Amino acid sequence: MARLSSLLRLPTCARGLSGGFFSSRCPGRGAVRAASAHVPQTTHPSAERPGLLSPRAPLPCAPYRTSSRTTLNVPPSAETVARPAGICTMLKLPFQESSKGLDAAFIGVPLDTGTSNRPGARFGPRHIRAESAMVRRHNASTGAAPYHSLMVADIGDVNVNLYNLPDSCQRIRQKYKEIVDADCIPLTLGGDHTITYPILQAMAEKYGPIGLVHVDAHTDTGDTALGEKIYHGTPFRRCVDERLLDCERVVQIGIRGSCYSPDPYKYSRDQGFRVVPAEDCWLKSLVPLMGEVRKQMGDKPVYISFDIDGLDPAFAPGTGTPEIAGLTPSQGLEIIRGCQGLNVVGCDLVEVSPIYDSSGNTALMGANLLFEMLCVLPGVKML
């Protein structure tokens, strides 16, 4: 009995009961074998008739969740590790504190103090992470195998200042500067759309003016609101002001809704942006459009910014500024998959506000779209 108790005191990961990853803190397979050697072996009545009730050896820690550069991080399969088990990270990838040694990193920005209507996007990152447990390793539709191509991990959240939006922007810019300086591609879990402004500040500091594939119900090119120049309706106006964007390589897709002026897209078009209203997308495939977008973007750096309200609220109700008659999920996939082959240097998925969708489907949609973004990054192999 004492020997059995010593086994039960082993770390959870050594007993094979969690979704933990194989690391220096986990005794691993050897510990499981060593510990089981001290337990008296008995023959179960069904041992000679293997079946669903046959005794099984403890599941070992997943050796594919490692921080070694020679072995890429691959999330555990739900066939061996229960989806609810383990620390809640994006796509059940390992967590590490920095982007050092990574080709791509998921990072949350839990900020919603730039919202103009319904708040709650600060909770987007944690809910997207939770729902991402449903996303599997391989993209069967495209053949993309990101975990066999890139070193990827979840690096946590930016420590934003919920009481000071300009200070939060400074914190975001500094964090993303560290990421891009490490030659790592950030995939961002928002957060409201304000966050894209400081992210692009960091991007442009390294790459110069950048191309943009922007999916949204709104152009987000307002100048001020209530006297403030920084909020989720102004990020791309601020980016133009600071010459962060290569304006001839900006496309805005899914734009719609009521407006404050008779020609709400005039500013975007005056800058050289291509604006694709939602009406031009209804009842059609966007594959031809994305062929044109690829030619427009060329081989220079491109950033993907996907506001979840670009999708129709029938599919993604959990957002702060919903607009009817939007894009479908399949069109969202066509847009992201249409970025395959572009020089994508960063992506974000913003404006998921979970409290307005108790089903969790909006966060699940966001998790899947982020996985699709990962699949189109440069260097991802097709199997």
Image (cartoon, rainbow, N blue to C red):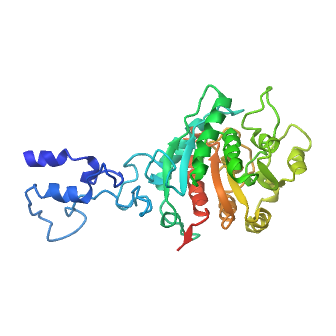
- Answer left or right for 78 relative to 192: left
| Whether residue 338 is visible | yes
Q: Residue at x 37, y 48 (%)?
A: 86
Q: Locate residue 99, reporting x and y percent.
A: 52, 49
- Answer left or right for 370 relative to 262: left
Say how many tags the image has. Answer: 0
Q: Locate residue 132, reporting x and y percent.
A: 50, 52
- Pick whichever, 56 or 12, lies toward us: 12
| Whether residue 1 is visible | no
Q: Locate residue 158, reporting x and y percent.
A: 56, 39
Q: Is residue 123 above or below residue 209?
A: above
Q: Residue at x 48, y 53 (%)?
A: 153
Q: Is residue 374 above or below residue 360?
A: below
- Pick whichever, 369 or 331, lies toward us: 369
Q: Locate residue 71, reporting x and y percent.
A: 41, 63
Residue located farthest toward the bottom when viewing the structure as drawn: 383
Q: Residue at x 70, y 44 (%)?
A: 201
- Pick whichever, 200 or 18, lies toward us: 200
Residue 52 sits in quarter: bottom left
Residue 331 sits in quarter: bottom right
Q: Residue at x 73, y 49 (%)?
A: 216
- Answer left or right for 244 relative to 126: right
